[in-house]
Amino acid sequence: MRHLVTLFCGALFGLGLVVSGMTDTLKVQGFLDLFGAWDPTLIFVMGGAIIPMFIAWRIAAIREKSVLGGLIPLAPKTELDRSLVIGAVLFGAGWGLSGFCPGPALASSTFGGTGGLTFLAAMLAGMIIAPPIIRVFKAAP
């Protein structure tokens, strides 16, 4: 049952990304172009994600197990540290340059031409090379 619910939730998420325009790189870049032809419509997409997650974390804080019986993950850290800031800057730069972030790239990989697939390949490469680079920086005095 958990696998079916997971499949349904993933498909619903992907459909939401397509319907909201998050898989359209020009729409995303238009949202990020604050001093040009700014397109503010993705603010509603963000609100549509932030509001339910705010409610979900409040409910999760008072529950011990999920509806399907699994453990509920801990809430994310709230303090800012160097790793979070650097990661956010890199994520934002990649999102602005390509118009993709991981979810929309995956959703568009089946119909969006080679852009989504190229982004996914670059993202996977980054995930592979990031841990050794992080170890080098953490070992440096």
Image: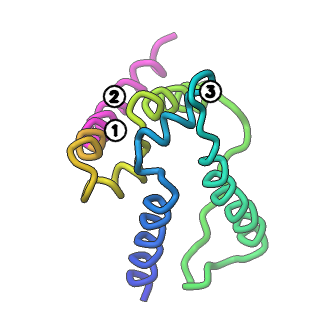
Confirm or deny contact between disc 3 and disc 2 (CB under 8 A).
no
Q: CA distance from mark 1 to mark 2?
A: 10 Å
User: Which mark is nearer the camera, 1 or 2?
Assistant: 1
- SS type, badge 1: helix
User: Which mark is nearer the camera, 1 or 3?
Assistant: 3
Which residue position is annotated with label 2? 132
Identify the image quadrant of residue 18.
bottom left
Q: Earlier in the sequence, mark 3 or mark 2?
A: 3
**Residue displayed at 69% across by 65% down:** 52
Total label count? 3
Q: CA distance from mark 3 to mark 2?
A: 35 Å
Q: As drawn, is 44 to the left or to the right of 141?
A: right
Q: Earlier in the sequence, mark 1 or mark 3?
A: 3
Q: Which span of residues is magenta-colored?
A: 121-141
Above or below, 130 against 17 in this view is: above
Q: CA distance from mark 1 to mark 3?
A: 29 Å
Q: Nearer the viewer, residue 127 or 98?
A: 98
Which residue position is annotated with label 1? 127
Identify the image quadrant of residue 55.
bottom right
Which residue position is annotated with label 3? 34
Q: As drawn, is 119 to the left or to the right of 101?
A: left
User: Which mark is nearer the camera, 3 or 2?
Assistant: 3
Residue type (three-letter) at the residue carrying disc 1: Met
Residue furthest to the bottom: 1
Q: Can you give x and y, in whole percent of width and height, for residue 43 in the image? A: 66, 47
Q: As drawn, is 125 to the left or to the right of 1?
A: left
**Residue displayed at 48% across by 26% down:** 93
Residue type (three-letter) at the residue carrying disc 2: Pro
